[in-house]
Image (tube, rainbow, N blue to C red):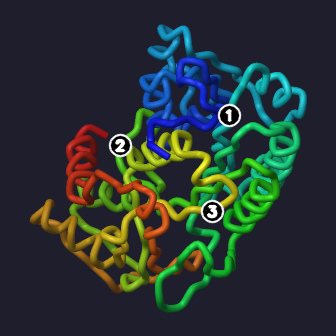
Amino acid sequence: MDSSEKVTGMSTSDMHILLTGGGGYVGMSLLPLLLNSGYGVTLLDPLYRGGLEPLLPFFRNSNFSLIKDDMCDEGVIENALTNVDAVIHMAAVVGYPACQREPDRTEKLNVAATEKLCRLAGNRPLIFTSTGSCYGVIKGGLCTENTPLNPVSLYGTSKVQGENLVLSIANGTVLRFATAYGLSPVMRIDLLLNHLTMMAVQSRKLSIYEPSARRTFIHVEDMARSILFTLNNYNRMAGEAWNVGTEEQNLTKREICLHLAKLIPDLELDFEAEGSDPDARDYAVSYEKIRSIGFETEVPLKEGMEELIRAYHFF
């Protein structure tokens, strides 16, 4: 199937997408891609993170609409699905710290609301954004989509439950992302590479625990591109999980810091700090499967770091 062929045989101008949780970090990079590609978009989001201001320019587009509400309510989901052809489900409590702070909401949004959405979506294509944290404790080798999932945190466990729900329906597809980084209209400073870069710019010193731990990264714009790619190639991808990222950004925390040191020459590095990752992430990931059908990331690590450095001078 050509990348321009759509899931229903309809043109993009005829297709309307429900984007849940699209007012956050990744969604605000995805939304303009969808609209510029001709899709109609209904955004379902309570706007807890970004507020209304980043969305104001999109109201100029008659193909955009907003439902400012919480999808934990089944009636809200039913209403949002009206005249919708496909669903991109991003709404979630994201990350270990946030899930630990709000375990009840994590269960309601990441699992219960996902179950409601899967049940109500019917035959509509449904793309679910997941995470490499589903792999949990992995020792050695590359994680592929067939690697057993072994989450150790509430975040990872809730995402595995969400994946299972989505893959249990006929038209569900899972994108299992590397750790995001890069600039977005709604920023997340807590993400590892974003946080390290900000600390490097502001304090000129980084103290790192577990420097040999391996992590894998993807720029937020490439995440958005991969979701659009999945929508445009849905018949090839339905019913499966797909790792999304690039092997070139399978890196240890030490390697990340050394890359930053090349861009910030006076940066002081300390690799003796105490601490541990609650998600126990220490693995590399294979992205061969999605690359084999034509998707590759475009933003190199150096370019993503440079944009963060430029912006963080004004934070």
Asked which secondary structure carries label 3, the reply is: strand
Mark 1 surroundings: few (<14), some (14-19) or many (≥20) residues within 10 A: many
Q: Earlier in the sequence, mark 1 or mark 2?
A: 1
Looking at the rendered structure, which numbered label has been put on residue 183? 2
Question: Do the residues bearing badges 1 and 3 touch, measured as CB atoms within 8 Å?
Answer: no
Mark 3 surroundings: few (<14), some (14-19) or many (≥20) residues within 10 A: many
Q: In this view of the protein, can residue 240 be seen by the observer?
A: yes
Asked which secondary structure carries label 2, the reply is: loop
Amino acid type assigned to the residue bearing label 3 in the image:
Ala
User: For this view, does 52 lie left or right of residue 106?
Assistant: left
| Residue 146: quarter of image | bottom right
Query: Residue 198, position in %: x, y?
Result: 32, 54
User: For this view, does 55 lie left or right of residue 299?
Assistant: right
Q: Earlier in the sequence, mark 2 or mark 3?
A: 2
Work out whether residue 183 or residue 75 is closer to the camera in this orientation and state it: 75
| Residue 156: quarter of image | bottom right
Image quarter (top left, top right, bottom left or bottom right) of the C terminus: top left
Which of pointers 1 and 2 indicates the residue nearer the eye?
A: 1
Work out whether residue 139 or residue 35 is closer to the camera in this orientation and state it: 35
Label 3 belongs to which residue? 241
Label 1 belongs to which residue? 86
